[in-house]
Image (cartoon, helix red, strand yellow):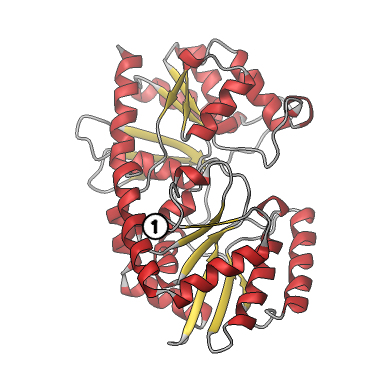
Amino acid sequence: MGGGGAHSFYLADALARHPDVQIHVLTSSAKNMPPEEKIRNKNLFIHRIDFGHSMALPYEPAIQKGLQLCKDICPHLLHAQHTGGSLIGLHLKASFHLPLLVTLHKTPIKWDKKIVERAPLYSYMKLLSQLNIIDLFIAGSQAFRRELQKIGVPEERIRFIYHGVPIRTLERLAYGKKKVLSVVQKLRLERNDNLIVCPARIDDRKQLDVFIKAAGLSRKELPDKTFKFLITGSTKTKAEVDYKNHLESMSRSSGVHDCLRFDTFDFEEIPALYRLAKVCVLPSSREGLGLVLLESLAVKTPVVVSKGMGVTEVVKTDERHGLFFLDGDYVDLKRQLVKIFTNKELVSRLRKTGHNRVKKHFDADMMANNYLKVYKEMIQ
């Protein structure tokens, strides 16, 4: 139930490959997608509904749909994703007395002891931690685990399972001719273009100004290279629009306005986008894990990251699984980008060892098997 984005999709898809498991996903409506869908050749059912709210009760339509599904399919267990899913799950748990586990996804850019007093999201998470009606909390990284503990969730109510990605599926999509052509045409990529991708929301917590300044310096230091810089994010709020305007102004002063683009891509285009890129950059100083890094490494595209919370669980060793730069230091980020374009031996090693790390620790099938163990434990 609820949000979780790519992680929820990857988990449900991997679980549904098990012949003795049936998965029903209650999620929000999506443009051009049917309200009810049975995924071909899998025990996976998608139920889409507008999660809007009435004055009486937030998420009322989704709760109503969930109640009806529980009566119709008699599930053995409820798994809620993040805060919206948690609210729905609490209602269903109270009505049907089913085991309930919750996976939380967000992490703040700045943590302190007062965060539950100033941030509504973490105030809500604190509330969830006090409710014994939730049987287990799932932490998708050690960073999430530590935050759950700091909020007040007892250790015995936390299970640690790394988020994972479907490597074979991402590889297949990365080389699909239609998807590759779609990305190439959308970005108007030429044969000699060097694409650098920053897969981040238009949010000042992602430190996109660091990426743009480093882009300008990289272009100056490597004048023989033709660059295209891409930020994959859209604006939804006034704050995001204002920040994007600030970034566009900065791109002009940094000398990359003519080769910087803001754009979004369909879910199935993302693997091809990463494969076409020379490098994936994540400049934020704090992440829960960095699922975009796993997706990039899965298709053997090197990553450059700020050495901060969460991402160091993916990029464990500098110059082996990826490249680190000092948090907020755009000059150091430029240095690492220059290495990508001047050291072929390093790039070859990063492609191989980064990919192997994802296969060993972050495969979606491994994630699904670990979840199944927890599910069976809760049901029994």
Q: In this view, does 312 lie to the left or right of 374?
A: right
Whole-percent x, y for residue 14 in the image: 30, 41
Mark 1, Cα crowd under 10 Å, few <14 / some 14-19 / many 20+, is many
Whole-percent x, y for residue 166 in the image: 33, 49
Whole-percent x, y for residue 95 in the image: 50, 13
Say if residue 54 shows up in the picture: no
Question: Which residue occupies 34% across, 22% down?
Answer: 374
Q: Split into 4 quadrants, where in the image is the C terminus? A: top left
What secondary structure is marked by label 1? helix
The residue at which mark 1 appears reads as: 297
Question: Which residue occupies 50% across, 43% down?
Answer: 289
Q: In this view, does 17 lie to the left or right of 30?
A: left
Residue type at the position of mark 1: Leu
* Residue 168 sits in quarter: bottom left
Q: Which of 339 and 146 is in front in this view?
A: 339
126 is higher (above) or lower (below) than 168: above
Say if residue 43 shows up in the picture: yes
Question: Which residue occupies 74% across, 29% down?
Answer: 115
Q: In this view, does 96 lie to the left or right of 165?
A: right
Whole-percent x, y for residue 341 in the image: 47, 76
198 is higher (above) or lower (below) than 119: below
Q: Which of 297 and 31 is in front in this view?
A: 297
* Residue 364 sits in quarter: top left
Q: In this view, does 67 lie to the left or right of 120?
A: left
**Which residue in the rendered view is the most extreme toward the bottom?**
224
* Residue 169 sits in quarter: bottom left
Q: Nearer the viewer, residue 254 or 86?
A: 254
Question: Which residue occupies 30% across, 27% down?
Answer: 372
